[in-house]
Image (cartoon, rainbow, N blue to C red):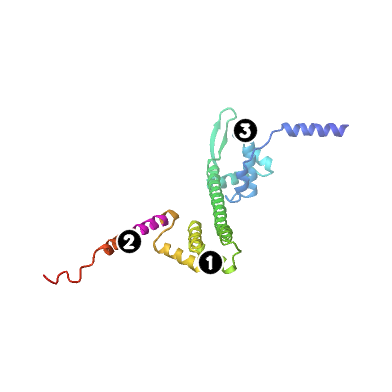
Amino acid sequence: MHKVNVYGSFTQALLFSGTASVPKCLLNHYNDLGINNQEMILIIHILSELDTNSSPSLSLLAQRMKLTNTEVENMIEDLRERNLISVEQHWNNTEQCWYNNFNFIGLIEELAERWAISQMRKYENENSQKDNQTDHNNESRPDLKLQKLVEIFEQELGRPLTGLECEHITSWLSAHFSEELIVEALRRGVSAGIRNFRYLDSILREWEKKNLRTKAEIEVDDANFQSRQQKKNVTKSKSDKKTPPEKYENFYL
């Protein structure tokens, strides 16, 4: 029973004795700033006192750390020389002594710089992962396009494609012919009764020479071709309709 009371009293004292708040960023980066473990403990002790005592004395800090006043004073001076902390001395009229007011602006600025660097690296890593994912997706797209085109070809031709024919389609995709143009070449070949892949390749290469990249551009080119042919036919027809001169037309002239 006595042990239970002691434990309960200790737990209550522990919970109500207060806590020391130490920024996680400081714990993660104090070694990067050249702060050794003993200096870090000193900073923690100072931070723990700031809520109730903005000017903890050297003797108090030395007592907490089991050090001499001189040792604590030397550590504080080292931190000051590295611009991690600043100390302003004020005279206490009541106690007739000087007291130290600690300022951690230098330490905060150094931590802010480390935080900015870590955030930038995180941002670069995320972008790098996104780029890798995009590259992976782009690499997988030709396979999806090939699969889709193979299905269309087999449906139009009414038979499975051979490995060589699949290689033809792959080469067209690698040459950046769109799915739309490849399918259009296929349908034109089927309509003409020619199902040879070399014929389809010749159609695509002809469109490439003319810089035709869409079905709409091909249809415009076809319309222009038909118009030219019609004009040629009309001209030829007019020429054929001319009456040839009589054999003796100019005999008596």
Q: x and y percent of residue 59 in the render?
A: 64, 38
> Which residue position holds label 2?
233
Q: Earlier in the sequence, mark 1 or mark 2?
A: 1
SS at circle 3: loop
> Which residue position holds label 1?
168
195 relative position to 66: left or right: left
User: Mark 1 and mark 2: span between their CA atoms?
Assistant: 38 Å
Compare residues 210 and 7 and report the one nearer the observer: 210
Residue 51: assigned label: 3
SS at circle 1: helix
- Residue in view at x 14 percent, y 72 percent: 251
User: Mark 3 and mark 2: span between their CA atoms?
Assistant: 101 Å
Q: Report crowding for label 1: few under 14, some 14 to 19, many 20 or more residues within 10 A (C-alpha).
A: some
Which numbered disc, 1 or 3, marks the residue closer to the eye?
Answer: 1
Give the extent of the magenta segment. 218-228
Q: Earlier in the sequence, mark 3 or mark 2?
A: 3
Quarter occupied by the C terminus:
bottom left
- Residue type at mark 2? Asn
SS at circle 2: helix
